[in-house]
Amino acid sequence: WTNFMPGESDTTVSKSSKVAEDVARQHLRETPLFVSNDRRTVGRGAADFLNTPVRAPQFSSQAVKLLGWTPAQPRGKQSATFVYEVTNHTGRHRVPAHAVALEDVDLHSQSKRVINGAELWVDGAYGFNTVTYHPTDGRLAYVFSSDMSVDALIAMVTRTDTVNTLLP
């Protein structure tokens, strides 16, 4: 992981994120979806499940399509998983974005990257890369996973309205 973007720094930490590992493991299993490409409908269903306000991240690229959401429980913690399909130069990729209620879950993983002030925690397991972002509101963290390269996943995550508050 040597390719950095402008405004980015890298700090390695010794912790391993069990949540990121679970998210990568869940990527291997096909789970039934509540199918909808409407962010509001998907967000309401997920918010009802989590009992907290949540919305599906919006990506700036038109190559990213929201497929729906599904409830999940990485490490026994409830999460709402928003599932996207991404088409890029390497093919089609399924990209789940887990909105995980924080509580006592330590989401820090092996490599911290700071991009334009946003802390992203990068990890990988079972052939999938994970990128975790914890917004400053303190209620939820978003764990994105994919078989895409870590740099492609980071680039995609930093272009969501969840991380980049300048997006519409």
Image: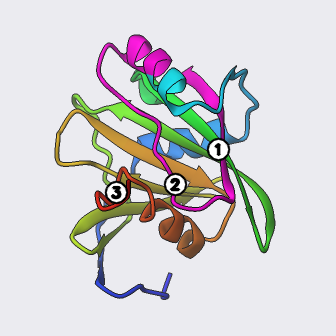
Where is mark 1, residue-wise?
84
Whole-number angstrom distance, CA of label 2 to CA of label 1: 10 Å
Residue bearing the label numbered 3: 163
- Judged left or right of residue 70, residue 100 is left
- Residue tagged 2: 59
Q: Is residue 119 above or below residue 16?
A: below
In the foreground, 144 or 6:
6
Q: CA distance from mark 1 to mark 3?
A: 17 Å
The residue located at (35%, 88%) in the rendering is 6
Compared across the picture, whether 137 is left or right of 100 comes to: left
**SS at mark 1 in the image:** strand
- Local crowd size for mark 1, using a 10 Å CA cut-off: few (<14), some (14–19), many (≥20): many
- The residue lying at 34 percent from left, 53 percent from top is 133
Q: Earlier in the sequence, mark 1 or mark 3?
A: 1
Residue shown at the point (25%, 48%) measured from the top left: 135
Mark 3 closeness class: few <14, some 14–19, many ≥20 residues within 10 Å: many
The mark found on residue 119 in the picture is: none
Nearer the observer: mark 3 or 2; the answer is 2
On screen, residue 28 versus residue 135, left or right, reads: right
**Residue 3, how many percent across, how many down?**
49, 87
Question: Is residue 127 something one can see in this rendering?
Answer: no
Is residue 6 part of the magenta span, yes or no? no
> In the picture shown, does residue 123 fall above or below 21?
below
Residues at discs 3 and 2 in contact (Cβ within 8 Å)? no
Q: Position of residue 72 (x, y in %)?
A: 53, 23
The magenta stretch is: 44-71
The three-letter code of the residue at mark 2 reads Phe
Q: Are marks 2 and 1 in contact (CB under 8 Å)?
A: yes
Q: CA distance from mark 3 to mark 2?
A: 10 Å
Residue 69 shows in this picture:
yes
